[in-house]
Image (spheres, coloured by chain):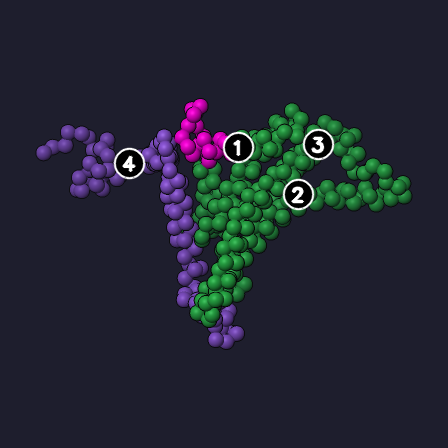
């Protein structure tokens, strides 16, 4: 039971060749670039989307933080498109793998933190001690703040992995239950099917929200450190 | 009738059936040749379905449908292990693979 439920999360290989590389390269191929000022509908739609994202996310940053715009917009486009593509049947979603998400989370978080330590050393160190703490609590609080700093990349990666994986698993399970229930009692199958439809709508939302949350948190770490 | 265009520069639809093996062997199989072939294919699809004034949603839908079919072919091996799972298994021991 366990093996077949998780079979869809296995890294796809074809005769030993890792096709997962091709699958990861598919979302970038869907995001077009154009040399013209006014281009086709598809590209204009993407331009509008990117403008919306930039306005929403980069307003709070200083000019130094805004140098990260390209990175953050690429991040949210990649995670959003990968999650949405994973909702198609039988497809493989790279963001369900902890390895992918760790590779995205750790360098970005480390970059933000190291940037903070290089340019604003005092302010970065001051983050470890919230204002107005009693003197006796200081050592413990510093330890706690250090741990919470180092747990940030893990939390970023695990949050994304767990959300997407859990959603896919629920869809598999409820879909399987609906199929089995059609021959036992059709009214229950109808109710289960409605639950499945609602869950799919939720998964579409989750796909986009998780991308947004990931990028927002990275930009927050950046804002703290610039 | 002797062919007036050299074999190497003919397109696929103009190659006669007898000339097909030699035509295939004459194609450019270097890495840059293969990349060029993919680039030409991409440009052909892009300019026909997406880069038009009033492109419809079918331009991207065809790509997504091909992606779904491709993923199905990849995962066929695991999917073929659960065939006809529309009934609950009779006994608990037999229900090892009911969650395919």
In percent of width and height, residue A222 lies at: 67, 33
From the image, which quarter does the N terminus of chain B lie in?
A: top left
Stretch in magenta: A31-50
Left or right relative to A68: residue B93: left
The extreme left residue here reads B1
Which residue bears the numbered disc 3?
A225
From mark 1 to mark 4, how far is it between C-alphas? 41 Å
Q: Colour of chain B?
A: purple
1 and 2 marks on the same chain = yes
Which residue bears the numbered disc 4?
B27
Label 2: how many residues lie within 10 Å, few (<14), some (14-19) or many (20+)? many
Residue at 48% across / 66% down in the picture? A187
Which residue bears the numbered disc 1?
A50
From mark 3 to mark 2, how far is it between C-alphas? 15 Å
Host chain of mark 1: A
Label 1: how many residues lie within 10 Å, few (<14), some (14-19) or many (20+)? some
From mark 1 to mark 3, how far is it between C-alphas? 24 Å
Quick check: is A39 in the magenta stretch?
yes
**Residue A219 location, quadrant:** top right
Which residue bears the numbered disc 2?
A153
What is the secondary structure assignment of the residue under circle 3?
Answer: helix
**Contact (Cβ within 8 Å) of mark 3 with mark 2:** no
Return the disc, 1 or 2, that comes first in the chain's sequence: 1
**Contact (Cβ within 8 Å) of mark 1 with mark 2:** no
Judge depth for marks 1 and 2 and give the one in front.
Answer: 1
The extreme bottom residue here reads B91
Residue at 58% across / 44% down in the picture? A209
Residue B47 image label: none
In percent of width and height, residue B47 lies at: 35, 32
The residue closer to the viewer here, A175 or B69, is A175
Host chain of mark 3: A
């Amino acid at each position: 039971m366990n093996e077949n439920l998780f079979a869809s999360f296995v890294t796809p290989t074809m005769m030993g060749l890792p096709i997962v590389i091709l699958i990861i390269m598919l979302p970038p191929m869907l995001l077009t670039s154009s040399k013209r000022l006014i281009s086709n509908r598809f590209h204009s739609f993407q331009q509008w989307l990117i403008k919306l994202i930039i306005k929403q996310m980069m307003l709070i940053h200083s000019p130094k933080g805004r140098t990260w715009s390209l990175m953050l917009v690429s991040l949210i486009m990649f995670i959003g498109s990968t999650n949405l593509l994973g909702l198609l049947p039988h497809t493989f979603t790279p963001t369900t793998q902890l390895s992918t998400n760790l590779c995205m989370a750790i360098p970005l978080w480390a970059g933000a933190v190291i940037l903070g330590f290089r340019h604003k050393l005092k302010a970065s160190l001051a983050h470890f001690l919230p204002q107005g703490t009693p003197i006796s609590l200081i050592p413990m609080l510093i330890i706690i703040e250090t741990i919470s700093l180092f747990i940030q990349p893990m939390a970023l990666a695990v949050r994304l992995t767990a959300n997407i994986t859990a959603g896919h698993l629920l869809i598999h399970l409820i879909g399987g239950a609906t199929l089995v229930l059609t021959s036992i009692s059709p009214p229950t199958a109808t109710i289960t099917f409605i639950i499945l439809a609602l869950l799919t709508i939720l998964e579409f939302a989750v796909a986009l929200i998780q991308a947004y949350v990931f990028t927002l948190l990275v930009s927050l770490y950046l804002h703290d450190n610039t | 009738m002797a062919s007036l265009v050299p074999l190497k520069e003919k397109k696929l639809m103009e190659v006669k059936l007898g000339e097909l093996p030699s035509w295939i062997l004459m194609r450019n199989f270097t890495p840059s040749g293969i990349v060029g072939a993919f680039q030409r294919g991409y440009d052909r699809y892009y300019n026909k379905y997406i880069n038009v004034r009033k492109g419809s949603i079918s331009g991207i839908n065809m790509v997504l449908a091909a992606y779904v079919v491709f993923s199905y072919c990849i995962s066929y091996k695991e999917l073929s292990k659960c065939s006809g799972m529309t009934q609950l298994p009779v006994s608990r021991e037999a229900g090892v693979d009911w969650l395919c």
